[in-house]
Image: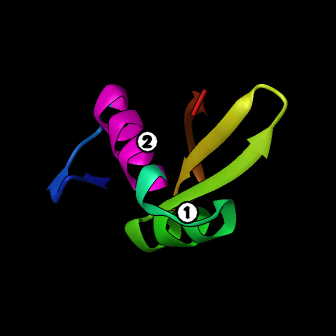
Amino acid sequence: MFAQNKLTDDITEIQEFLRAERAKSLSDSDWRFRMRGYGYNLRRTDAGVEVARLPQNQMLGVFQI
């Protein structure tokens, strides 16, 4: 998906992008809304944040953010 205005499948780039966007967001719900606009679905779990690619909802991984 897109991270930093380029198409990428690199997990570390996606994780850095998610952290940078979280720092810009005012709340957790605002962050999730912004990420849906970029094509990512975020869901909080006990293990961290599950990140999936939309529209297929393909799981990319669980990150500690």
Snapshot quadrant of residue 45: top right
The location of residue 51, given as percent across then percent down, is: 58, 44
Amino acid identity at mark 2: Arg
The location of residue 42, given as percent across then percent down, is: 63, 53
Q: Is residue 55 visible?
A: no
Q: Is residue 54 above or below residue 52?
A: below
Residue found at the far right of this picture: 46
Q: Nearer the viewer, residue 23 or 6?
A: 23
Q: Residues within 10 Å of mark 2 (few under 14, many from 20)?
A: some
**Residue 16 located within the stretch drawn in magenta:** yes
Provide the secondary structure element on which disc 1 rests: helix
Q: Is residue 29 above or below residue 51?
A: below
- Quarter of the picture holding the C terminus: top right
Q: Residues within 10 Å of mark 1 (few under 14, many from 20)?
A: some
**Left or right placement of residue 19 versus residue 3 in this view:** right
Q: Nearer the viewer, residue 15 or 9?
A: 15
How far apart are the alpha carbons under marks 2 and 1? Answer: 10 Å
Q: Residue at x 23, y 43 (%)?
A: 8
Q: Nearer the viewer, residue 39 or 28?
A: 28
Q: Is residue 63 above or below residue 31?
A: above
Please name the residue that numbered disc 1 is placed on: 31
Q: Residue at x 34, y 45 (%)?
A: 17
The location of residue 24, given as percent across then percent down, is: 41, 60
**Residue 13 located within the stretch drawn in magenta:** yes
**Left or right placement of residue 32 versus residue 43 in this view:** left
Amino acid identity at mark 1: Trp
Q: Residue at x 60, y 63 (%)?
A: 32
Tag count = 2
Please name the residue that numbered disc 2 is placed on: 19
Q: Is residue 22 visible?
A: yes
The location of residue 19, given as percent across then percent down, is: 43, 42
